[in-house]
Every structure is written in C-alpha cells, then in structure tokens.
Image: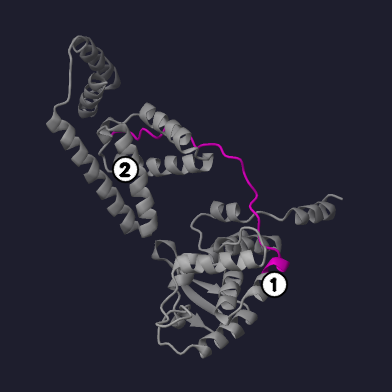
Amino acid sequence: MMKKMIIREIIHDVAGLLDSRQLDELRSVLETRLKNVDITESADIVEKNKQDNSRFLDMFISAKRVEGCSESTLKYYQTTIDRLLADTNKWIKKITTDDLRLYLAKYQQQNNASKVTVDNVRRILSSFFSWLEDEDYIVKSPVRRIHKVKTAQVVKETLTDENIEVLRDTCSNLRDLVIIETLTSTGVRIGELVKLDKADVDFAERSCIVLGKGNKEREVYFDARTKLHLQEYLEQRTDNDPALFVSKNAPHTRLTIGAIQRIVRTLGKQAEIVKVHPHKFRRTLATRAIDKGMPIEQVQRLLGHQKIETTMHYAMVNQSNVKIAHRKYIG
C-alpha cells in the first residue's frame, strides 16, 4: 500500500511535465524498481500526517464557517470527518475510494444506520474531499466514484386543518398559542423563530424579517389571527427582553431551540397527534401552498431555499388533490 501511495505522489508531482504516455511509462518503471523494496513509515511521519489531517480539517471547517454554516452543522461536519480519519488512520492524501467504500459499509453495519444517514455521511465526505481538490491539496477527490446512496422516497406526513385546530385548543397560555400560529402561518425554521426580535415584526404589513441559513435575511408573512394574538401576547409581557418569545418565568429570557421543541412536542402529546415537531409546520405550509396553486418559485422564496429541488422535496403533493386533478384534466 505504501508503494502505491509513493508512486501515486510521484506521478502527481510530475503530471504537469509529462504527457499521458510518459506518465504510464514512469509508473511502470517505478512499479518494477520498487517491487522487492520494503517501505515503512517512521513514527515521525505518522505524527506529522496526523497533524496535517487536523490542519486540513480545521481549514475546511473555517471555510464552511465563512460560508455561513451554523455551529451545529459545523460540529456535525467535524465529528463525521474525525470519525473517518480515526477509523482509516491514514494521511488524508493517501485515503482512497476503496478506503471510503469500506468505511461507509462498516459504518452502516456497526451503527445499524439507515440509507439516508449513510448518504448524509457520504455527502459530508464528498464536500470535504472536493474542497481539498479545489484547494489543490489532493489531485482528485476519492469520493467522486462513490455514487449517491439510493433511498426510498417516503411521503412525509403533514398536519391537517383539524390537527392544527386541536393544537390551538390544547395551548394553556397565549405564548404557546402564538408559537403554534407563527409556525403555521410563516413556515419559518425553528432556528429562525428563536432569533426573532420584537423589532423584526411589522404589524401593518403582517410580516417579519428572519435571519435564515447562511445569515441571509428574508421577509415572511403571518395571517390576521396570528397578528391579533401576537399583539395581545406582547401587550401582556412585563419584561424588557428584545426577543419575540421568552420564558414564562423570570428573568424571562429568549427561548432556545430545545425549549421550542419541548413545547411543541408536549402539545402534540397532549393533543394525541403523532409526531408533532416544529419542522412539520414548515412542510405543511409548503405542501398547502403548492396544492393551492402558488408558483413553486414563490414557495421557494417564502421558505428561503437556495435550490428549487429542496422545495420540491419538502412539498409532497396531497394525494386527494392528485385524484381531483385527474378527474378534472383526464376524466
């Protein structure tokens, strides 16, 4: 294995000086000359390679931070790549496609991971090695020949009108009701919801400015019912915290993502509705908007998606509407 890596590195170093025939000839000569030679890495080299790996990973994470990735995403990237490096125990420049295939297969087996999870790992590794290639630290990403893991397309459930009404009725305080109504009418991400300040809300236009992924601002809108309840909630507040949603008890601090998740999950359990979580409101909004004829480009803008394919993935068309459309257009 060491010989192959040395030959590959030599070929890489002279690739710009020789044509393909000369490179093939050089490779053949090197393989012949090194055939009976034993090559091992010294402890110093091994330690240097580990330091190089850490340096490359730190630079990649820094690049992603500059691009606007959230800290939770960066942590996921770091952990995923660290696991690979620990498992392969190789210098990044020496990791091959076979190494990655073996790692992904082992990862799936040891963790009983779903195909979706394995593909998420593959995408992160692809992003990392593509960055190394773009920055000229490696010649070619070893992930290139590892194709996307095929997964079954699951039509994820959305909330019905009845579900939402039951959730509203289940709320025991005005703050929780406004949270449910804001999620329902705006379709904001939970990370965007917790960052909202009172100053971000424009009641005259029934809109607010949210800070989305990549620190990009966009305008979202809420309905008349949300407006009335939000105004009432803010009028009842006695604290001076700038946050739109705060804890019920003093010192009334900004609600965290974890707090919002607990509130929504608890309401779902009390209402006896299966799998209620903040993101389900976002998917529901997207699906309803498309079902009612909103152009997909406008839904994309409303949700803050960079790629329209993401919007299509979120918006699963209601089957009953497919049936109605079939009767209308086909007969």
Q: 305 above or below 201? A: above
| Picture coordinates of residue 257, whole percent (x, y) | 46, 66
Q: Image quadrant of residue 13?
A: top left
| Picture coordinates of residue 213, whole percent (x, y) | 43, 62
Q: Is residue 168 visible?
A: yes
Q: 136 above or below 39? A: below
Q: Image quadrant of residue 72?
A: bottom left
* Most distant residue in the right direction: 331
Q: Local crowd at mark 1 within 10 Å, few (<14), some, or many (≥20)?
A: few
For residue 165, which numbered disc appears in the image?
1
Specify whether 165 is left or right of 240: right
Q: CA distance from mark 1 to mark 2?
A: 46 Å
Could you tell me the amino acid type at mark 2?
Asp
Rendered residue at 64%/81% (across/down): 225
Q: Which residue is mark 2?
A: 82
Nearer to the camera, 256 or 123: 256
Q: How many marks?
A: 2
Q: Is residue 69 visible?
A: no
Nearer to the camera, 58 or 27: 58
For residue 222, which numbered disc appears in the image?
none
Q: 223 above or below 215? A: below
Specify whether 73 is left or right of 272: left
Could you tell me the amino acid type at mark 1?
Glu
Q: Local crowd at mark 2 within 10 Å, few (<14), some, or many (≥20)?
A: some
Specify whether 269 is left or right of 93: right
Q: Earlier in the sequence, mark 1 or mark 2?
A: 2
Q: In the image, which residues are magenta?
A: 139-164
- Identify the element where label 2 is drawn: helix
Look at the magenta stretch and give its main secondary structure. loop
Rendered residue at 45%/73% (across/down): 255
